[in-house]
């Protein structure tokens, strides 16, 4: 029986579309995106930068404004605050200063107090503000806010008041011995010829064997003046920095950081100085006579001719000195901190 011949046809196999594509164009998995550089948090100025910047600012302001400080001390030791007596006192004190360098009498203790004090104060204030701002940022998950004219963190008014108060209280007590020596050195009640004589004279004053307590005379009055002053100052300073740029832009005046910071510092210092003026008069009276108490010095001042106004004796000179001192020191400090930050950022790039 003859077999029928049939064509030898291979069975058809259906291929999936994926296998019909050339192997050289098989799609690859999407490439992972390039890693983005991690943005490091902005670090505040270091302790060394704060100390150096604050010290330089303090030295400059103390040296430039020492004549106003000397005349203020001489005026506050007088027994009257009438305008006639004030004019006579200022003319008399200026007449006694036969050489121009005598206006800078006491500049060494003043530079020590202001330079060391400013360095410590700016450091404590910066650390306290940075720590508080960092804590708030971690709690809220947001970045630390700063002012347009400053590299320092931005806080609420109450936080500005609190940090300034605490920082000044700590530094004021540490620098109290220098403050007492400075006041006695500037006064014409003590004719000290050197720092050594001033230190020994203060140590043995009223105590044959000497007493360390003499270097802390008037500490309560000083803290009652400086701590509220610093708190109010930081409060007014930050508020002025927030408002002045808008005002200056409307007046077509330069709103650079140095102009804003200097103007804000002058305004803040003037307001805070006026509020704390009575404590300055009491402090000076206590440090010139360590036999008095705080209440006794207050009664003595108010009992002299002029009455209550005696508590504001020397306010005009202190206003001028404090305003200019704050404008100089805070402007120098903020600009040095800014320059240090720019320098560090260039090193890191």
Image (spheres, helix red, strand yellow):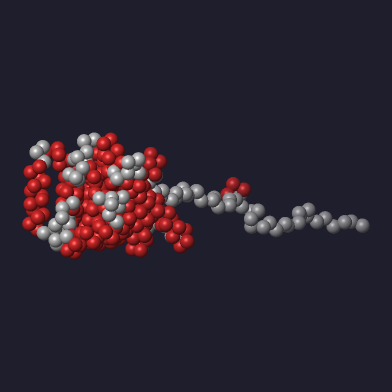
Work out which quarter of the rendered image holds the C terminus and state it. Answer: top left
Q: Is residue 182 left or right of residue 3?
A: left
* Residue 99, visible in the rendered structure: yes
Residue furthest toward the right? Answer: 1
Q: Is residue 223 visible?
A: no
Q: Nearer the viewer, residue 282 or 50?
A: 282
Total marks drawn?
0
User: Can you tell which quarter of the image residue 52 is in?
Assistant: top left
Q: Nearer the viewer, residue 96 or 298?
A: 298
| Nearer to the camera, 250 or 48 | 48
Residue 309 vs 40, above or below: the answer is below
x and y percent of residue 320 in the render? 17, 53
107 displayed left or right of 50: left
User: Could you tell me which residue is drawn at 29 percent across and 38 percent down?
Assistant: 200
Q: Residue at x 28, y 52 (%)?
A: 291
**Where residue 101 appears, x then y in whole percent?**
14, 37
Q: Nearer the viewer, residue 265 or 219?
A: 219
Q: Position of residue 282 (x, y in %)?
A: 25, 56
**Residue 173, x across and y down, in percent:** 35, 50
Outermost residue, front direction? 208
Instruction: Find residue 246 and report its image quarter.
Output: bottom left
Locate the N terminus and report the quarter of the image it occupies.
bottom right
Residue at 28% in and 35% down: 196
């Amino acid at each position: 029986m003859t077999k029928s011949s049939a064509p030898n046809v291979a069975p058809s196999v259906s291929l999936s579309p994926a296998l019909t594509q050339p192997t050289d164009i098989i799609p690859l998995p999407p490439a992972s995106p390039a890693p983005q550089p991690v943005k490091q948090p902005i670090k505040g100025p270091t302790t060394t930068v704060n100390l150096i910047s604050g010290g330089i600012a303090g030295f400059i302001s103390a040296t430039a404004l020492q004549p106003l400080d000397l005349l203020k001390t001489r005026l506050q030791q007088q027994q009257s605050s009438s305008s006639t007596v004030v004019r006579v006192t200022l003319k008399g004190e200026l007449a006694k200063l036969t050489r121009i360098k005598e206006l800078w009498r006491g500049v060494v203790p003043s530079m020590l107090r202001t330079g060391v004090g400013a360095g410590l104060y700016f450091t404590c204030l910066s650390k306290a503000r940075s720590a508080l701002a960092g804590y708030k940022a971690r709690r809220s998950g947001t970045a630390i806010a700063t002012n347009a004219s400053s590299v320092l963190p931005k806080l609420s008014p109450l936080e500005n008041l609190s940090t300034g108060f605490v920082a000044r209280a700590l530094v004021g007590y540490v620098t109290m011995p220098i403050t007492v020596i400075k006041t006695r050195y500037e006064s014409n009640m003590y004719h000290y010829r050197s720092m050594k004589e001033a230190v020994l004279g203060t140590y043995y004053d009223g105590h044959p064997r000497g007493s360390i307590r003499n270097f802390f005379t008037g500490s309560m009055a000083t803290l009652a003046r400086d701590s509220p002053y610093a708190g109010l100052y930081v409060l007014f300073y930050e508020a002025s920095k927030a408002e002045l740029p808008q005002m200056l832009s409307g007046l077509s005046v330069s709103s650079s950081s140095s102009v804003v910071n200097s103007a804000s510092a002058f305004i803040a210092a003037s307001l805070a100085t006026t509020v704390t003026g009575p404590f300055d008069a009491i402090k000076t009276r206590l440090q010139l006579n360590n036999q008095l108490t705080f209440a006794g010095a207050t009664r003595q001042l108010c009992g002299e001719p002029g009455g209550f106004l005696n508590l504001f004796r020397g306010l005009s000179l202190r206003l001028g000195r404090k305003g200019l001192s704050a404008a100089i020191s805070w402007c120098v400090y903020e600009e040095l901190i800014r320059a240090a930050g720019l320098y560090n950022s260039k090193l890191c790039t």
